[in-house]
C-alpha cells in the first residue's frame, strides 16, 4: 500500500511538472491578450496648424458625423511644448487632434495612431518582446501615461493608458490602419505586429490590383490583419507612389461613398482621388482643411456580407 501511495505522489508530481509550463504559457498568453482594450480606442493622430484646427473639426465632423470633446491646451510630450488637444469621435473612426502652438518635439508628429492598452508596463514588455523599438520611453501626460514604439519598417505608433479608463461606444464600422512597408521589411513587420497584437492575417494577396496604390500598370502585395486593436492593411510597395498614396494613415469605411464624398466637398474638403472600384470595394482619397489625407471606402455586397458574418 505504501509503495502504491508513493507511486501516486510521484505520478501527481510528474503531471504537475509537465502541465506547469503549459499553464504558465497559457497564463502569459492570456495576460498578453489583455494588453489591447478594443478597436474604438484606436485614435488617428492628426497634427494641423493652430489656425486650421476649427476648420478641420468642422469639415471632419460634417463628413462623418459625431462630436468633439472640449478643446484644451496641454503639454502632451515629455519635453516642454504646448498644443490644443481634442478628440473627434465619429461612428467610423476617432481622431486625436493637435494644433501645436510651439515647435513639435521630435519624434512626435510621425506617430500614426494611438492604441489604448490595459497595462502600460505589460504593453511595453510585449512590444519589445515582439521586436519593436521603444523610441520614446513611458512618460506621464495630464490623464495617464504614454510611450512611442517603432515597428520593423519604421512604423511609429503611440501607446497610451488612462488613469481613469474611458468608455467609448463601439464603432459602427471599424476603420483600418493603413501601413506602407517595403518588401524587405514586410515579413518582419507582420510577424512583429501579430505577436504584439495577438491578431491574425485575414487575407494576403500577392497580386492585388495596382490601382489601389495609384499604379494601375502593376500589382502589389496587400496583407489584411485583424486584431483586438482593430483592422490594419499592410501595403507592400517599392515606394514608387504617386501623390497622395502613402500619405494617408487611416481608411474610413462608410455605408455610401458617394454621399460621404458629397458631404466632404460641401464641408471644404478636397477629393484628391475620385472614386474607383477594386476588390469588391469602392474607394477615394480626400484631403481635409489643414492637410490631413484620408482614404474613404465602402464595401460591395460580397465584402459587406463577409464583414457582417464576422
Image (tube, rainbow, N blue to C red):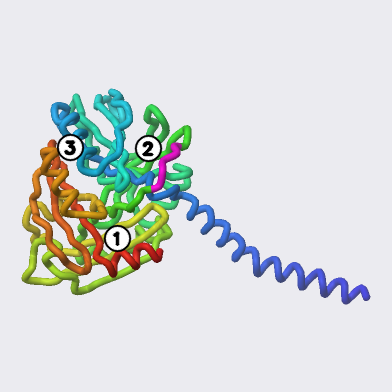
Direction from residue 268 to residue 234 in the image, left or right: right
Along the line of sight, which residue is nearer the eye, 176 or 195? 176
Tell me the element at label 3. Answer: helix
Residue at 24% from the left image edge and 44% from the top image edge: 64
Find the residue positioned furthest to the right: 1
Tell me the element at label 1. Answer: helix
Whole-percent x, y for residue 6 in the image:
85, 72
Q: Mark 3 points at which residue?
A: 59
How far apart are the alpha carbons under marks 2 and 3?
Answer: 29 Å
How far apart are the alpha carbons under marks 1 and 2?
Answer: 22 Å
Badge 1 or badge 2: first in the primary sequence: 2
Residue 146, numbered label: 2
Total marks shown come to 3
How far apart are the alpha carbons under marks 3 and 1?
Answer: 34 Å
Q: Which mark lies nearer to you, 3 or 1?
A: 3
Q: Name the residue under label 1.
A: 189
Q: Would you say the magenta stretch is mainly helix, strand or loop?
A: loop
Q: Is residue 287 visible in this depiction of the protein?
A: yes
Whole-percent x, y for residue 183 in the image:
20, 66
Residue at 16% from the left image edge and 42% from the top image edge: 292
Answer whether labels 3 and 1 touch (C-beta < 8 Å).
no
Q: Is residue 77 visible in this depiction of the protein?
A: no
Task: Work out which quarter of the rendered image holds the C terminus and state it.
Answer: bottom left
Residue 225, numbered label: none
Amino acid at each position: 500500500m505504501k509503495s502504491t501511495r508513493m507511486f501516486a505522489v510521484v505520478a501527481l508530481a510528474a503531471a504537475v511538472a509537465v502541465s506547469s509550463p503549459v499553464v504558465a504559457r497559457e497564463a502569459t498568453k492570456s495576460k498578453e491578450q489583455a494588453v489591447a482594450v478594443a478597436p474604438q480606442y484606436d485614435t488617428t493622430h492628426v497634427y494641423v496648424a493652430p489656425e486650421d484646427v476649427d476648420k478641420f473639426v468642422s469639415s471632419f465632423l460634417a463628413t462623418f458625423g459625431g462630436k468633439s470633446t472640449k478643446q484644451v491646451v496641454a503639454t502632451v510630450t515629455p519635453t516642454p511644448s504646448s498644443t490644443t488637444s481634442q478628440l473627434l469621435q465619429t461612428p467610423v473612426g476617432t481622431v486625436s487632434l493637435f494644433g501645436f502652438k510651439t515647435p513639435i518635439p521630435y519624434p512626435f508628429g510621425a506617430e500614426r495612431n494611438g492604441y489604448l492598452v490595459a497595462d502600460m508596463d505589460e504593453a511595453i514588455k510585449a512590444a519589445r518582446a515582439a521586436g519593436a523599438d521603444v523610441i520614446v520611453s513611458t512618460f506621464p501626460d495630464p490623464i495617464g501615461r504614454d510611450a512611442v514604439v517603432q515597428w520593423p519598417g519604421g512604423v511609429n505608433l503611440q501607446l497610451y493608458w488612462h488613469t481613469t479608463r474611458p468608455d467609448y461606444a463601439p464603432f459602427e464600422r471599424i476603420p483600418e490602419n493603413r501601413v506602407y512597408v517595403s518588401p524587405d521589411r514586410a515579413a518582419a513587420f507582420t510577424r512583429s505586429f501579430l505577436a504584439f497584437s495577438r491578431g491574425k492575417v485575414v487575407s494576403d494577396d500577392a497580386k492585388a490590383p495596382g490601382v489601389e496604390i495609384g499604379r494601375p500598370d502593376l500589382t502589389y502585395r496587400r496583407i489584411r490583419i485583424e486584431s483586438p486593436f482593430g483592422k490594419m492593411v499592410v501595403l507592400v510597395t517599392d515606394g514608387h507612389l504617386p501623390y497622395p498614396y502613402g500619405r494617408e494613415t487611416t481608411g474610413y469605411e462608410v455605408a455610401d461613398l458617394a454621399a460621404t464624398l458629397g458631404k466632404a466637398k460641401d464641408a471644404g474638403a478636397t477629393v484628391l482621388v475620385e472614386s474607383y472600384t477594386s476588390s469588391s470595394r469602392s474607394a477615394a482619397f480626400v484631403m481635409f482643411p489643414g492637410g490631413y489625407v484620408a482614404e474613404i471606402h465602402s464595401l460591395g455586397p460580397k465584402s459587406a456580407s463577409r464583414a457582417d458574418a464576422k
